[in-house]
Amino acid sequence: QVQVVESGGGLVQTGGSLTLSCVVSGSSFTPYAMAWYRQSPGNQRELVAWINTRNLADYSDSAKGRFTISRMNVRKTLSLQMDNLKSEDTAVYFCNKDRRVNNNLFPWGQGTQVTVSS
């Protein structure tokens, strides 16, 4: 049974930092391009950062220059270092395969809440 578990969220002030982690179990991890997504109330789940199997990463315009995605294949772990957080980063963050290049996503985890207070 495939399981995705995100952690590391919390309450932080504007300008602060958080590091999110995601662990995948019950499936291979290495062959897949992976991504972080976020969803705030009333909005669709949006792609924030992605990393391919060769560790090439890219980011949404809102995340570029502030977020850093990384992966550790041996531990089936995906991370997101978030710096200089803004109130608009407040959302539930999820990890999964990069949906643009993968048809069969992992089951969605519960996500981890990030709240940035001004």
Image (cartoon, grey):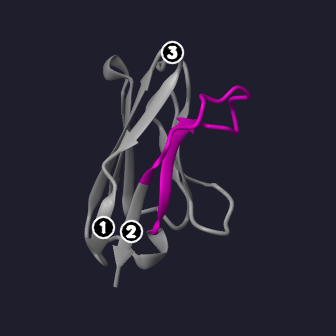
Mark 1 element type: strand
Q: Quadrant of residue 69?
A: top left
Q: CA distance from mark 1 to mark 3?
A: 31 Å
- Residue 4 placed where, x, y %? 47, 31
**Would you say residue 83 is visible in this rendering?**
no
**Magenta extent:** 90-112
What residue type is disc 3 on? Ser
What residue type is disc 2 on? Thr
What residue type is disc 1 on? Leu
Q: CA distance from mark 1 to mark 2?
A: 5 Å
Which of pointers 1 and 3 indicates the residue nearer the eye? 1
Residue 80 is a magenta residue: no
Residue 95 is a magenta residue: yes
- Residue 30 placed where, x, y %? 47, 19
**Would you say residue 97 is visible in this rendering?**
yes
Q: Where does the N terminus fall, quadrant-wise? A: top right
Q: Residue at left 49%, top 25%? A: 3
Q: Residue beneath label 3, please? A: 27
Taking depth in this image into account, of 69 and 17 the one nearest to the observer is 17
Q: Residue beneath label 1, please? A: 11
Above or below — where is 68 with respect to 22? below
Q: Residue at left 36%, top 73%? A: 116
Question: Mark 1 and 3 residues: CB-CB less than 8 Å, in contact?
Answer: no
Q: Residue beneath label 2, please? A: 115
Question: Mark 1 and 2 residues: CB-CB less than 8 Å, in contact?
Answer: yes
Q: Count neighbours of disc 2 (C-alpha within 10 A) and say few if under 14, some if 14 to 19, many if 20 or more.
A: many
Above or below — where is 29 with respect to 81? above
Q: Main secondary structure of the magenta part?
A: loop
Q: Count neighbours of disc 1 (C-alpha within 10 A) and say few if under 14, some if 14 to 19, many if 20 or more.
A: some
Above or below — where is 20 with respect to 5? below
Q: Which label's residue is closer to the chain start, 3 or 2?
A: 3
